Image (tube, helix red, strand yellow):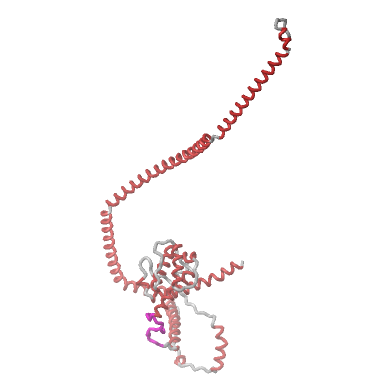
Amino acid sequence: MAEEGEVEVTRPHMESEALALNSDMVDMLSLLNYEKEFCDKEQPPMSTVYFVYQASNQAQQFKYFHTLLQWVLEKVGIAPQWQKYDAAAGICTHVQVALEKAGIKETFAPAKLKQGNGVEVCRALHGVLKKVFDKQQEQGEWKWGPPEWPDEPMFEEQDGESDAEANQSVDESVNIGDDDDDVMYAEQAPTRVEKDQEDWQMLESSIDPREWALELERVTPQLRGIRVTTDTNEWREHVENTKKYGEVLTEALPEASGQLAALGADLANILQRVRTKESYINSQFDTRNDNYGNRKREIKEVTDKQNGLNEGHMVLVEELRSLTDEYETTKGEMAERSQTCQDTAPLVKIKDAKKRMQEDIRQMDLRIGVVNHTLMQAKLRHRPADATPNKGIWDEED
């Protein structure tokens, strides 16, 4: 709540400050003859409230601000670094730098300057204009002097004359009504008897002046609130005014008719010349218009072809991506297999195992031979005796 109150209080103050600064700027620019050196059809002379409120075309208002500031900075001897068609944010940044070069220590928010109106814009322009006049005063080109008043005939209005004129106007208004009433009721009113000569003599007051002054002091506060209003709806005044205006129009009609007729003839000639020039320009640019249409169709065809090629390119890129993924997968498998083929450790192991098996086989054959020999000897020893002639031999050997 406090913040809202502060905003409501400070906003009128800022607006009044902007109004004062804008009014001073108009006077300063008039002294610098900016109407002839700066203004043109696109940028006419500004009013005393142009930079105070937001304009209907805010872009045009911001353009007027930075171009006018550029013109004023050149008066100080500072070359602005922004161009006419630069971005608004870039122009605001360059404006800050230029104001620092001009010696203005106040910092302005770029968002406030981008609006093209407000107290910040007025402060920036007003500060640079003061620098221009300070520089001209130092160089002797400008000197502040006392104001010069134009020579006008001086006259004094006498109080008696003003009161007499007022009384005369009141009497005339009263007499007008009386005359009309006399005319209206002339048949009914009786003849007026002439007054005596005594009624036309000068009246002399017998009232004490001090009592009159006291009565005046007593009644004056009550008379201050009374306002005499004239009846503006009186039909007689309307009739008189209508007659006067009719006479003025009758006098001015011939001259105005002649001027309007001359103006109409000039406008007709100008319109005819514009139409002739327009037809000439159209005839001159017919071929260029046809060429432009042909170029436009060619550009459309090329654009359609480019769009088709772009679509084909995207399809090929997608296919290339899938093939690349497949290639990477195949390359990994081949690298793994190549590494497996080049690895001789399993073969060495197989050879060592083969040698051990062969050694085991030889040992086993040797053991088998020893076992066979042992069995053969055992069988021969336990063989039963035969009734053959050799029995004696075996017995002897035993």
Main structural element of the magenta stretch: helix, strand or loop? loop
Magenta-tinted stretch: 139-155
Considering only vertical position in the picture, is 162 above or below 232? below
Regarding residue 270, the answer to whether it shows in the image is yes
Considering only vertical position in the picture, is 142 above or below 68? below
Q: Position of residue 334 (x, y in %)?
A: 50, 36
Residue 177 falls in image quadrant: bottom left
Residue 268 falls in image quadrant: bottom left
Looking at the rendering, in which quadrant would you find the C terminus? top right
Which residue occupies the foreground of this view, 21 or 123? Answer: 123
Q: Position of residue 25 (x, y in %)?
A: 43, 74
Q: Is residue 265 magenta?
A: no
Which residue occupies the foreground of this view, 51 or 159? Answer: 51
Q: Residue at x 61, y 68 (%)?
A: 2
In the image as oriented, which residue stretches furthest toward the front?
Answer: 396
Residue 161 falls in image quadrant: bottom left
Which residue occupies the foreground of this view, 232 or 300? Answer: 300
Regarding residue 187, the answer to whether it shows in the image is no
Q: Is residue 141 magenta?
A: yes
Q: Position of residue 296 (x, y in %)?
A: 33, 48
Considering only vertical position in the picture, is 305 above or below 217? above
Q: Residue at x 39, y 63 (%)?
A: 84
Looking at the rendering, in which quadrant would you find the N terminus? bottom right
